Image (tube, helix red, strand yellow):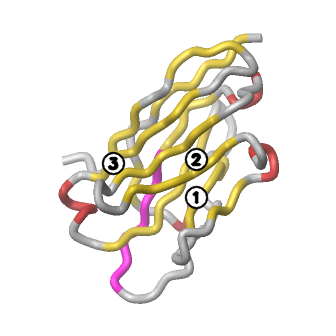
Amino acid sequence: QVPLVESGGGSVQAGGSLRLSCQASRYTRSARACMAWFRQNPGKEREGVAAVNRDDMPNYADSVKGRFTISQDNAKKTLYLQMNNLKSEDAAIYYCAARVFYGDEACGWLEASMYDIWGQGTQVTVSS
C-alpha cells in the first residue's frame, strides 16, 4: 500500500493557481510524521519547496516565498500546497514526503535526505 498519494496537479497558464493535496494512507496515519513538498525536473536534483515544523510553522524555499502556502489537516492526515502566481520555472513533478517519528523531531527540513516516505508525484505544467 502506497503511504502517500498526491493529487491536484495539472496545467495552468503563468499567473494561475493550483492546489496540491497529499493524503496519508492508513500506514502513516498511525504515527506522527514530518511532512513536506518537493519538486523535480528531469536531470535535476529534487528540490525542497515547503515543509512544516513541529510547531506547525512553515519553511519555504526562497523561490516560492510569498506565492506558495503549505498547510495540513491533522484530522484528515492531509497535506496541502496552495500555489499562486505560478511561473514557468515552477513546472515540475511535485512530490509529497514524510518521515515517521515516535519521539521529538524538529521537522521543517527542505533536504530530501531527511525523508524516507515518498508519494508517486503529480505533474504541474505552467505555460507562458
Q: In which quadrant will I find the C terminus?
A: top right
* Label 3, label 2: how far apart the Cα atoms are: 13 Å
**Residue 117 coordinates in the image, percent (x, y):** 39, 57
Q: Amino acid at mark 3?
A: Leu
Residue positioned 30% across, 52% down in the render: 24
* Mark 1, secondary structure of its residue: helix
Q: Is residue 30 above or below residue 41?
A: below
Q: Which residue is mark 2?
A: 38
> Which residue lies most toward the bottom here?
103
Q: Amino acid at mark 1?
A: Ala
- For the magenta stretch, what is the residue range? 96-102
Is residue 110 shown left or right of residue 98?
A: right
Marks counted in the figure total 3
Residue positioned 27% across, 72% down in the render: 31
Residue positioned 80% across, 44% down in the render: 63
Sequence order check: which comes first, mark 2 or mark 1? 2
- Residue 4's label in the rendered image is 3
Is residue 114 shown left or right of residue 64?
A: left
* Mark 3, secondary structure of its residue: strand
Q: Nearer the viewer, residue 63 or 45?
A: 63
Q: Look at the numbered discs 2 and 1 and tell me whether their residues touch, using CB distance below 8 Å.
A: yes
**Residue 4 coordinates in the image, percent (x, y):** 33, 48
Q: Which residue is mark 1?
A: 112
Front: mark 2 or 1 = 2
* Mark 2, secondary structure of its residue: strand
* Magenta-colored stretch includes residue 100: yes
Front: mark 3 or 1 = 3
